[in-house]
Amino acid sequence: MRIALITDAWAPQINGVARTLKETVAQLRAGGHAVRVIAPHHFRTLALPGEPDIRLALGAGRPLGRLIDSFAPDVLHVATEGPLGWTARRHARRRGLPLTSAVHTRFPDYLRARAGVPAALTASVLRRFHRAARRVLVPTPSLLDELRSAGFGNLALWPRGVDAARFSPGPRDALEALGLPRPVFLYVGRVAAEKNLPAFLAADLPGSKVVVGDGPALPGLRARFAKAHFLGARDHCELPALYRAADVFVFPSRTDTFGLVLLEALACGTPVAALPGCASQDVLGTSAAGALDDDLARAARAALAIPRERAADYGRRFSWAACTRIFLDQLQASVAEGASGRS
């Protein structure tokens, strides 16, 4: 297939959306498919207020249309609901091109937490956006049910994977130089309001708490929780060693749609402690590779007793190759659906 993938989230952004798309594109190209990624770096950009690392494309209308038309794709996949996503959506409608989209982020919860925007208003805008897509791909069954109840249509599952060659058990000495008391409880991800980090940092736990990541909430949390260890953003290649060094990976978010970090930690043999939520419940299921509890400290203490072998065995079940096959099946079905409608 010839696939035009339009996304407002791409390198050098460090987040689960950009990582999912990068892995998927690599798998598609390895399978012989032609993929053109159209991202903010193709255009003039403006930093998102409060998020200097996130650049929004400006004036993309005609240039984006030319990039799409010159590639002559079989299908457009619009990965994000940002400026490029809206522009590509309009272009697809004008050209009659098959269009698929995806829900990676709970924007109603995100904007309510960040800016106080009513969730119902954001959901209404998103319903309009995704109505144009023949397939709306979502990462978990719980989110699919939630979106269906909120009036979204054409929904289909597209789960996530993990690079088991990189994220696997190994030496656990990456944090030894810090001399941290054990057990070590680790968080990796964006340091932002919607991630609910105070639930982790305020929890009554023995040993040490370590936070890896950057974001707008970092200065305030560093000042408020002086006993925690904030290591800042780390390159993706450093993460396996950090996951292995921890005794428990803590996931306090209730708003993530999937949480790739859950799979990465598990594949490295690190049990997970999480608050019940769409991502944590669907990823962990009944695996016993993690502990879920509305009391995060209780979940973290319970996770200490989970064998690392059990966590690793469960984490390696997820592969990017399998996820990409599902993604491709959905795109092919959307193209066939359009061809059938024209015949």
Image (cartoon, rainbow, N blue to C red):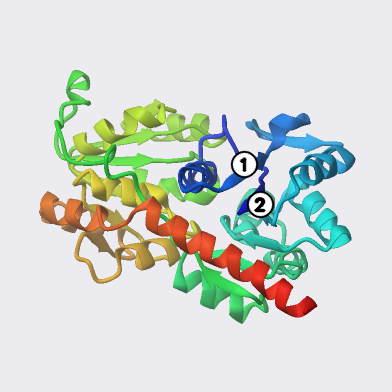
Structural crowding at the residue carrying mark 1, measured as other residues with C-alpha within 10 Å and reported as few (<14), some (14–19) or many (≥20): many
* Residue on which disc 1 sits: 9
Q: Are marks 2 and 1 in contact (CB under 8 Å)?
A: yes
Q: Foreground residue, 182 or 132? A: 132
Amino acid at circle 1: Ala
Residue 251 placement, left or right of 180:
right
Q: Foreground residue, 343 or 243? A: 343
Label 2, label 1: how many angstroms apart (C-alpha)?
7 Å
Residue at horizontal 69%, vertical 50%?
A: 115
Residue at horizontal 67%, vertical 67%?
A: 335
Q: Quadrant of residue 129?
A: bottom right
Label 2 sits on a secondary structure element that is: loop
Residue 146 placement, left or right of 306:
right
Which is more N-terminal, label 1 or label 2? 1
- Please state, as top left, top right, bottom left or bottom right, where the N terminus lies in the image: bottom right
Indicate the position of residue 97 as horizontal and vertical percent values.
78, 61
- Please state, as top left, top right, bottom left or bottom right, where the C terminus lies in the image: bottom right
Residue at horizontal 71%, vertical 51%?
A: 73
Indicate the position of residue 117 as horizontal and vertical percent values.
72, 57
Q: Look at the picture and state if 222 lies above or below 134.
A: above
Amino acid at circle 2: Thr
Indicate the position of residue 16 as horizontal and vertical percent values.
49, 45
Q: Quadrant of residue 280?
A: bottom left
* Residue on which disc 2 sits: 80
Label 1 sits on a secondary structure element that is: loop
Q: Foreground residue, 51 or 81? A: 81
Structural crowding at the residue carrying mark 2, measured as other residues with C-alpha within 10 Å and reported as few (<14), some (14–19) or many (≥20): many
